[in-house]
Amino acid sequence: MKTNDIQIKETFDFLYLNERCLSASQFDFIQGLKKYYRQNKCLSEKQARALFEIRKYLNIDEPIRMTGKQY
């Protein structure tokens, strides 16, 4: 698995956990990218860049709480 594939999957997971912070158009765009990624197993460079930019500039005020072992 390529590093870019791992980053894409992690970004989709992060955005899923924080979907309440997305606008309706961002949410629709991400859903379309997920569908495209499932079908083609890749994203174009522009699609991946747009996905990463959404994550980068998403305003998250509170930390995500994880269950399980605390370090």
Image: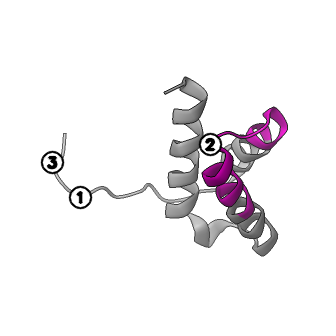
Q: Could you tell me which residue is drawn at 18 percent across and 54 percent down?
A: 68
Q: How far apart are marks 3 and 1 (CA)?
A: 7 Å
Q: Which residue is more in the foreground, 25 or 44?
A: 44
Dominant secondary structure (helix, strand or loop) of the stretch shown in magenta: helix
Q: Which quadrant, please, contains the C terminus?
A: top left
From the viewer's perspective, tell me whether residue 56 is left or right of residue 61. Answer: right
Residue identifier under label 2: 41
- Residue 66 painted magenta: no
Tell me if residue 46 comes above or below residue 26 in the rendering: above
Q: Where is residue 4 in the image (x, y as percent from the top left)?
A: 60, 29
Q: Is 48 one of the magenta-colored residues? A: yes
Q: Where is residue 36 in the image (x, y as percent from the top left)?
A: 71, 54
- Which residue range is magenta in the image? 32-49
Residue at the far top: name it: 2
Crowd band around label 3 with a 10 angstrom C-alpha radius: few (<14), some (14–19), many (20+):
few
Q: How far apart are marks 3 and 2 (CA)?
A: 33 Å
For disc 1, the marked residue is: 67
Q: Residue at horizontal 72%, vertical 40%?
A: 43
User: Which numbered disc covers residue 69?
Assistant: 3
Left or right: where does residue 38 sit relative to residue 32?
left
Counting other residues with Cα less than 10 Å from the Cα at mark 1, is it few (<14), some (14-19), or many (20 or more)? few
